[in-house]
Image: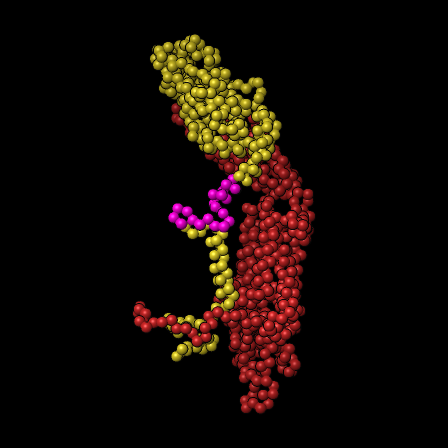
Amino acid sequence: MNSLPPKFQLKLPEQPQLYEKRKAVCPKPVDGRFRRLKWLVMVVTLGIYYITPWLRWDRGPYSPHQAVLVDLAHRRFYMFSIEIWPQEFYFVAGLLIMAGIGLFLITSAVGRAWCGYACPQTVWTDLFQHIDRLIDGDRNAQLRLDAAPWTAEKVARRLSKWSIFLAISLATGGAWVLYFADAPTLFRQIWTGDAPSVAYATVAVLTATTFLLGGFMREQVCIYMCPWPRIQSAMLDEKSLTVTYKYWRGEPRGSVKSAVNSAVPLGDCIECGMCTSVCPTGIDIREGSQIGCITCGLCIDACDSVMKQLGRPRGLIDYATLEDSAAEQAGAPSTPHWKLIWHARTLVYLGIWSLIGGGLLFALGTRHHVALSVAKDRNPPYMLLSSGELRNAYTVKLRNMEDRPRRMEITLIGVPGAKMWADDMAKGEASRTLVRNVAPDQTDPLRIYVEATSGTAPQPLGFSLRVLDAEGGTVSYTTRFDAPELQPDQ
Amino acid sequence: MANKHIDQATGTETVGHEWDGIQELDTPLPRWWLLTFYATILFAIGYVIAYPAIPLGDHATPGLLGWTSRGQLAKETSSAGADRKPVLDALAAIAIEDLPKHPELMSQAIAGGKAAFKVNCVQCHGSGAAGSIGYPNLNDDDWLWGGNLVEIQTTITHGIRYPGDPLTHMSMMPNFGADKILTPAQVQDAASFVRSLSGIAPKGDAAARGAVLFATNCAVCHGPEGKGNRAVGAPNLSDKIWLYGGSQEQVVSSITNAHHGVMPAWGARLDPVTIKMLAAYVHSLGGGEDFAPTATNSGAADAGAAAPAASGGAAH
């Protein structure tokens, strides 16, 4: 490498602007098929988010009655009729994997639809942009107010708008914590000041992030912060649906008036600017596919309504694949969208996704609701008693995952002549079978002593568990019975 | 600048360098990024002021909040101590013989005793309380000085042959061989008899000779049938458990030079609650005895049973 030139000096740029202020994005309202879809998705997602913690589900006298509850304190995860214990966390891991592959599947089938419709950042930004319009008026009024000096009116408008932002943000953070405790109780506690400090801290953090990211950062989150657009741009191919400006139909652009005097016939784009003024991320889709495009389709709605007024066919801007665009340029009619989404990659993702989902459902349907685990004492491995008999000790855990008390019977398998007793029993009651009542939704840890006759050799020992009720259920566990190795002379 | 480099695709100026055909766009950073950067600097300054930060040789600037890691540990320790206090108070108030009537308190005492055992007792008795030659196994059902809660508590409090504690368990087996009370041949015979009591040696001529010696020299403490006597800590010689080894050589050695094991009196070192918890733990290990008056070392009537090879240790 060459060393720096001796006369090297820092060149100051002509524009000393190393940092750029965000350009205000004040989208115009628009109506159309995709806007309505966006409304629907917003209502459904926000509805699920806010209503779910309040749904009740009867689980009998021993378990909480909240339909969806992440009970961290008791290490249980409830979802309607499903109850997950910590050792079954693979169900949650499986759901997360399905969510990941689901995103791939959606991307493969319909492009960045997650970004455009369902991503919380998009939903809350959309909501906050409606508040903008409600308080500050339409796009032009918003832009004027933005540039205006800080008069009393501007301060009043800003304060009222930010108050609404804050209220929405509080509701967002507040709803989140309700998933982790009994919702009605916690809701009351939050207002009376009795909620745990971790609840307030969580609400505060989520309120702050919603307020900042939804109220102020908005599209900058998608453009600068979120990794998903980068990942998606690597996943898009010539079969992916993207919002496409059909330049072959639109160019050269020109207003309806200028078309009259134009030497060459003009395209369908009349440069009304509607597509850019409705864009929630402030881009111009006519520059082509770009990372700022979340494919929400609002520009399609805007352009369609203009084309309708002009009596021209809709779809100058439309969802299209690269492949289909090429075909269309060559003169072929455009393929309906529903046909475009079925291609090999989509089907492969769908297959994997369904396979995992099916596997989880199968595991869920066939899982045991009782379990037995045995940990043998290894220090000391065995105990010689005065009588010469040998004793081993075990920690046996009987797990009852049902919401009712169950009677369980444990039986020794192997080691002839051995008997067992628990530490809360007298040794005189020892036998090869024990019966215990296990409380609902509990693990009963038992200390079990197994005593075998003098001279017993080391050998495998099994415990089997049988549930003594109509539903039944059997599990077993094999461990060891330790004893001194017999010497040849004995 | 004289020659501007403009990127064709984006219309943005480049910084003017090129690496293998790759040029860098001179896109200005967004302002929020700059503001975030300033915010982190402000946070750092605040942190340095509030918390210990700048090293000054043997110490550092203390910070306005006065936080220290030691202080935090002390606070957490004392709050943990406050959490334990109700249990410790309850244990202090209860007599140890009433402990089994309160299973919850009992299990807490056992847990506390387990922790205290790891600190104070494992050096001799081992981490599993299984002992070794000369150090009794606390899991089994063989007790020199008694195995109910009160007796265990007494043993822990006053120790065994511990100088300075007038209430310590005290007994002295004579050195039958070394002090020439018995001849070496007589010691051999006595050992043969003792071993025949638990069936690990045949009842031959030597044992028969030993039986006579036993009746005159040993039975006063160990009992006519060798079943021991807890009042004087005389071990049961008819069971399969040998504190100092059960081979002929080991038994001969124990008779020749008696062992006088010592355990410290923990009453002078540990508080009564800890001792209570230790007693509960040791009692819970599997050999703890009830308060029934029949608590004796009832040796098993398995005379013909093969003794396991590892049967350790004749006592004294």
What color was chain A assigned in the picture? red
Note whether A119 is above or below A269 in the view shown.
Answer: above
Residue B157 is situated, as x and y percent measured from the top left of the image, at 50, 24
Image quadrant for the N terminus of chain B? bottom left
- Given residues A462 and A111, the one toward you in this image is A111
Note whether A150 is above or below A255 in the view shown.
Answer: above
Residue A80 is situated, as x and y percent measured from the top left of the image, at 65, 51
What color was chain B assigned in the picture? yellow
Residue B299 is situated, as x and y percent measured from the top left of the image, at 50, 19
| Residue located 65% across and 48% down the image | A194
Image quadrant for the C terminus of chain B? top left
Residue B299 visible in rendering: no
Please check the rendered image and state whether residue B57 is part of the magenta-colored stretch, yes or no: yes
Query: To which quarter of the image does residue A250 belong?
Result: bottom right
- Position of B121 with respect to B83 (left or right) is left
| Residue located 65% across and 51% down the image | A190
Please give the count of numbered marks on the rendered protein.
Answer: 0
| Residue located 60% across and 87% down the image | A257
Residue B203 visible in rendering: yes
Q: Which residues are magenta?
A: B56-77
